[in-house]
Amino acid sequence: MTTPFLDSSLRGRSLIGGDLGGDSAGIFHGINPATEEKLDPPYHTATLEETRRAARLAGEAFAIYRRTTGAQRAAFLREIASQIETLGDALIKRAALETALPDARLNGERDRTCGQLRMFANLVEEGSWVNARIDQGNPERKPLPKPDIRWMLQAIGPVAVFGPANFPLAFGVAGGDTASALASGCPVVVKAHPSHPGTSELVGHAVRRAVIESGFPEGVFSLLFDSGKEAGIVLVGCPEIKAVGFTGSQRAGRALYDLAASRSEPIPVFAEMSSINPVFILPGALRERGDRIAEGLQASVTLGVGQFCTNPGLVLMEKSPASEEFSRRLAGLMAGSPSGIMLNRNIRTAYDNGLAKWRSHAKVQVLVAPGESGVRASAALFQTDASTFFDNPELAEEIFGPATLMVRGTRDELLRVAAKLEGQLTATVHGTDEDFGEYQDLISVLETKAGRLLFNGYPTGVEVCSSMNHGGPYPATTDSRFTSVGTAAIYRFARPICYQNCTQAQLPPELRDGNPLKIRRSIDGKFDAAMP
């Protein structure tokens, strides 16, 4: 192996364990979305052999890394956070060049990235996340002796992580997928998003320095660059990879899901994909505070040029004079929204194409038409009736950007629309106490459609905490049982194992008599008396 690379300057090459990748025939650049100029350095696409080697190194590292203690992994995660913070303004400046996101947003993302790394460090250091269960044996039981059985969660194996364009830090190289996988004891191979390769490389070197400082095997972390699909396809097919974390489009997420399912050993893909995040505004709330709701909704739709997976792309109300006035109010606010630069040309093109479909529909009314061209995008607002929306499934497709579609109809029509909606990351209801009582049937339907149900709020803004669920029924995600945000995200990358009649010396510390780690455990169906 070559001498570990410790410099944070950009080299434009993948990190294959402790080595830099070599030259390749495939070259691409980061692009400044504000000017559409290429950014140096050029990035060399990971070769197929480099991709396979990264997976092999991860497989070799797993044998050692899975047996590290929670305290060791906690120190590692905290070291990653410290190394990212050490990058200082260089990281923010590069990310701004590659994404056109404002410094305030990027500083917030860096804080979130480091905060969630430390959050997972606290989780694994305490240790109860393994959900230890013990059923003690009874050799005197009749007619058959009862075996001693002990159960806990352990790391599933090396994880392939695919980051998105819209969160270069919080969901990027050291984002939530990587943090939760490393916390569980899984090595990680990241396929960097081509929209921000320089940002990814800087963070990748920070993680690599933390691996060295922690004394872990080099294969605990690798970073691959590729502007296309080939490296990702090869990576998911590598036998060492045991799970995939993905954030992005439904098309790409479903392709990875199908690929992983077609392996001789199928593996789980935890893909967060599309969502239109419906917002229902009930009559009482509309009468009491319609203007305030319109202001909050406009801010949520246009936040970050609409480039959030929780962007409210559908607003539903009963048809009434109050909802007509709300439409006029929201239209005025949307028309006055400033334009913004989208993350890359592909996203802007998809936004324009989506709006063109809405505009071409005979029964969809344009209330606010986008007025910008080139690299800038502006807000758009459309309106239709419930029966048209119900009969035209294409109107329920996600448009990634600062646009939303208002749908008005009768109470029964809106309930039918809710029942027909696909799975969502979020669903929001604005109402009064009386509304919530009267529309309990709507709320019951939405509970089956979304992973997060909001009341009198707005879906953009995801709190990183132990109780957050950032997931939902398909196509919001490929597995609605899990979240990609919050401490529960660790469970995606763990599997249960039980030990039957195992000697104390061979048991993991989490399952030994006396509870040496002082974690919360279930003993014969009851939690430890000494634990809260």
Image (cartoon, helix red, strand yellow):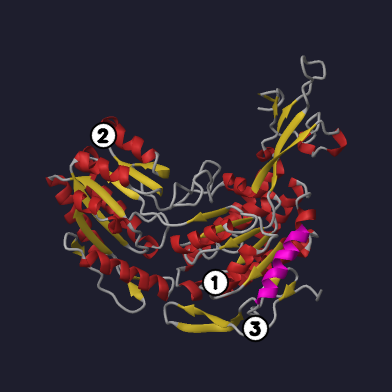
- Quadrant placement of the C terminus: top right
Magenta-drawn stretch contains 442: no
The amino acid type, in three-letter code, at marker 1 is: Lys
Q: Is residue 341 visible?
A: no
Q: Earlier in the sequence, mark 1 or mark 3?
A: 3
Q: Which residues are magenta?
A: 47-61
Magenta-drawn stretch contains 60: yes
Q: Which residue is mark 3?
A: 24
Q: Main secondary structure of the magenta part?
A: helix
Going 35% across and 45% down the picture, which residue do you hit? 428
Q: Earlier in the sequence, mark 2 or mark 3?
A: 3
The amino acid type, in three-letter code, at marker 2 is: Asp
Instruction: Tell me the tag on residue 435.
Output: 2
The amino acid type, in three-letter code, at marker 3 is: Ser
Q: Earlier in the sequence, mark 1 or mark 2?
A: 1
Going 36% across and 73% down the picture, which residue do you hit? 349
Residue 27 lies, in percent from the top left, at 58, 83
In the displayed structure, would residue 234 be above or below residue 451? below
Kind of element beneath mark 3? loop
Q: Residue furthest left?
A: 321
